[in-house]
Amino acid sequence: MRWSSPQLAHLLWGVLLLALLWLYAERARRRTEQLLGEPAALRRLSSEAGPRVRAVRTVMVLLALALLSLGLMRPQAGFRLVTTTSQGVDAVIALDVSRSMDARDARPSRLAAAKREALALLNGLEGSQIGLVEFAGSAQTVSPLSTDREGLASLVETATTRDVDHPGTDLESALSLSARLLSRPGERPRAVVLISDGENLEGNPDKGPGELKRTGAKLYTIGVGTPQGSTIPVVDSTGATVGVKRDAQGNVVNTRLDEAALRKLAQTGGGRYEHGDGSGTAGLRLVDPIRSGGAYEARGRTIRAYDERFPWFAAAAGLLLIAERLVPRRRRS
């Protein structure tokens, strides 16, 4: 016998507490009966069944509650071997964490909007193997291809514009690193989703789609921000805005969404472009096109599938509660 939810064992303490409260109430009841007169005479006058019958009924209820508590702990016994399978694609999310992603022409910021689109993708591509790349002036692998959606979601949620030390934006390095993550044997459908404002300060992004094509991957892009652009806030260690970013000449830097560049990359890479407003709809709109490349069924690991024994505990508790209702409350005359 094993327990799938042993953390619920504390429910048994509640049953014990009820038992102690019943004992306390019984003692108080006996003292009251003794003050009112002879307990046996009182029971004859009231036709009550007596303390033994009350004890039997109470024990039945407490046992039923204990059995239900044990049942909620999900007792399991006996198992069968099951080989897991998963349906999905191989995909890499390339997330722009350059300083321009702090701009607030998307609410509450470009990066926050980008992260919501990435999370929507993770939810939509259930069963897929997904990797995560962050980039600014250089790119870094945050996670290789993985089916751990919760772990990937945690990495996305904690991403900041300080994760990559090299300032600037290099779309080519992001796409090249994504291509390397997808370079492995097999005929599985592959895709890269680039989430960025499209600004590029280093490298030649036009080389990226070619590298992806050699791995068999399609390139999809999500743009965040507005073509009108916005300033880039400068914040202190407490998160308070203390100014705006300026260039070497002291001029205020204005950053704009380059939709044309992102659309061109997607068309060259065989995918498509979506504008992300931070609601997650852009990410979800890409799920079907990404999956349309054909999903694969991957043979997973062999696990033990245990047989649940909760019904037996529930049935025993039910029988006890029925039996408790059949115990007479009054003496038969």
Image (cartoon, helix red, strand yellow):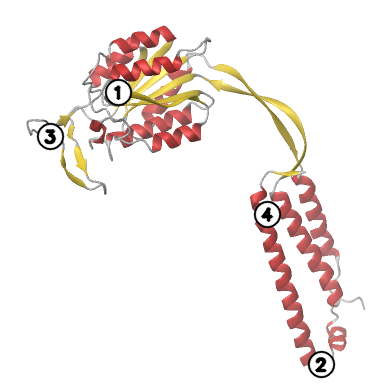
User: What label does residue 63 carry, if any?
Assistant: none
Q: Amino acid at mark 3?
A: Arg
Q: Is residue 323 left or right of residue 233?
A: right
Residue labelled with disc 2? 37
Q: Quadrant of the C terminus?
A: bottom right
Q: Is residue 19 left or right of residue 249?
A: right
- Residue at image coords 69%, 67%: 17
3D distance between C-alphas at marks 2 and 1: 91 Å
Q: Residue furthest front?
A: 165
Q: Amino acid at mark 2?
A: Gly
Q: Nearer the viewer, residue 84 or 124?
A: 84
Whichever of callouts 2 and 1 sits on the residue coming sooner in the sequence is 2
Residue labelled with disc 1? 138
Q: Quadrant of the N terminus?
A: top right
Residue labelled with disc 3? 246
Task: Give the crowd class for mark 1: few <14, some 14-19, many >=20 residues within 10 Å.
Answer: many
Whichever of callouts 1 and 3 sits on the residue coming sooner in the sequence is 1
User: What label does residue 9 carry, if any?
Assistant: 4
Q: Nearer the viewer, residue 93 or 185?
A: 185
